[in-house]
């Protein structure tokens, strides 16, 4: 399948309530974990898209978590490129292409 899907780690793939240091990554969120595993089984390229990737010393903790949860070998990044086709993230607000308007209401942002 062309392109890759980015999946955020904290709050999307793993439970998150506050920063507890780089070695702590929450329990997997089963529906998202199952979704990612299914994509991989279908041959879809998936990358873990996380701010943790901006600190190279944090990567071993993410790799360990991925291995423990059946996702060993997925690329970990914090960089979008032209091949990214989707981003699944708990903090995203999707906007209408070329219009700058959100596609859904955001209580936090008041629109």
Image: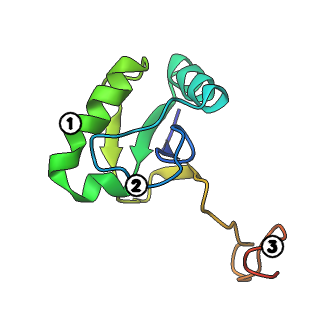
Tell me: 76 left or right of 97.
left
Earlier along the polypeptide chain: callout 1 or callout 2? 2
Q: Which residue is mark 3?
A: 107
Q: Is residue 84 above or below residue 67?
A: below
Give me the C-alpha separation between circle 1 and circle 2: 17 Å
Q: Residue at x 41, y 40 (%)?
A: 47
Q: Which residue is mark 2?
A: 19
Q: Which residue is mark 1?
A: 60
Observer-nearest of 59 and 2: 59
Q: Quadrant of the C terminus?
A: bottom right
Observer-nearest of 88 and 15: 15
Give me the C-alpha separation between circle 3 and circle 2: 24 Å
Give me the C-alpha separation between circle 3 and circle 1: 36 Å
Q: Nearer the viewer, mark 3 or mark 2?
A: 2
Q: Residue at x 62, y 32 (%)?
A: 32
Earlier along the polypeptide chain: callout 3 or callout 2? 2
Residue 106 sits in quarter: bottom right
Residue 31 sits in quarter: top right
Observer-nearest of 31 and 48: 31
């Amino acid at each position: 399948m062309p392109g890759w899907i980015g999946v955020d780690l904290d709050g999307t793939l793993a439970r998150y309530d506050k920063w507890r240091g780089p070695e702590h990554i929450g329990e997997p969120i089963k529906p998202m974990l199952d979704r990612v595993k299914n994509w991989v089984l279908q041959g879809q390229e998936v990358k873990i898209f996380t701010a943790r990737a901006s600190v190279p010393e944090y990567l071993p903790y993410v790799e360990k978590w991925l291995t423990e949860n059946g996702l060993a070998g997925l690329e970990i990044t914090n960089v979008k490129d032209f091949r990214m086709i989707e981003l699944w993230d708990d903090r995203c607000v999707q906007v209408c292409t070329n219009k700058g308007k959100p596609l859904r209401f955001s209580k936090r942002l008041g629109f």
